[in-house]
Amino acid sequence: MEYREPLIKNELAESDIGKLSHELTYHKYLLNNDKIRSFLHKLSIPEYLAMHIIKENELTDDIYAGRTYLKDISDQMQRPMRHISRMIKALQERGFVAWSHDGDGSEGTYVTITDSGRRMLEEEEEALKRYYGKVITSYGKENLLQLLQLMKQLENVMSEEFKGMEVEAIEEQGTDE
């Protein structure tokens, strides 16, 4: 059996990688399309995720007294800090978060959810729960848990491969000089 695995990988590499990469890209697109956005009335999907991160930090993080640092949001959402800053500014302008900083700001800026933001987030979460409750019932909780576990494993492999490709690109640039 061990001698067949390289053959299977080669067969996959030659005939299916293009098809499978398209399918992965397509399904990621479908998961992030307008159908899901239509359930959110006041937030975009990234705004919802950021607000949820802030809410979860308030509930679970005793160290920072309910503060969520922009760096933490940036890290969790895997988005550049400037993108997160723009998004948080928009949420602040709408009255959903309060944005502050430690000391002179060089030690980090953080956000907390306002009462208005908390009410709005609860409404958005209820809309998503109604939809996903039906999806989970139809698909099956165990199937969904298994799928999420597999997706996490895939995400980890993809991240590692991406890091490896970045290192290779840096090494190639270094050898050209």
Image (cartoon, rainbow, N blue to C red):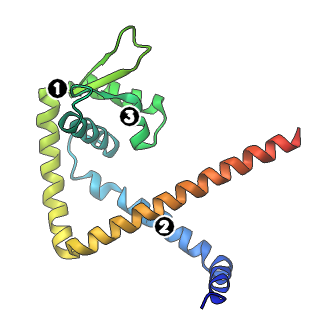
Between residues 73 and 120, which one lies in front from this camera angle?
73
Q: Give residue 145's position: percent from left, percent from top.
A: 28, 68
Above-or-below relation of 127 to 9: above
Tell me if mark 3 has few (under 14), some (14-19) or many (20+) residues whose alpha carbon lies within 10 angstroms of its own: some
| Amino acid marked by disc 1 | Thr
Name which of mark 3 and mark 2 comes first in the sequence. Answer: 2
Closest to the observer: 143 or 23? 143
Residue beneath disc 3 = 72
Q: Nearer the viewer, residue 101 or 93?
A: 101
Query: Where residue 175 appears, x then y in whole percent?
Result: 86, 44
Using the rendered view, name the quadrant where residue 142 is placed.
Answer: bottom left
Residue occupied by mark 2? 24
Residue at x 35%, y 66% (from the top left corner): 149
User: Disc number at residue 171?
Assistant: none
User: Which of the two discs, 3 and 2, sits closer to the camera?
Assistant: 3
* Amino acid at circle 2: Leu
Determine whether label 1 and label 3 are within 8 Å by CB: no
Which residue is situated farthest in the top direction here?
Answer: 104
Q: In the rendered structure, find residue 114 and report the number of the disc placed on it.
A: 1
Kindly identify the amino acid type of the residue bearing the numbered disc 3: Asp
Instruction: Calculate the distance from the C-alpha at mark 3 to the C-alpha at mark 2.
Output: 27 Å
Q: Secondary structure at mark 1?
A: loop
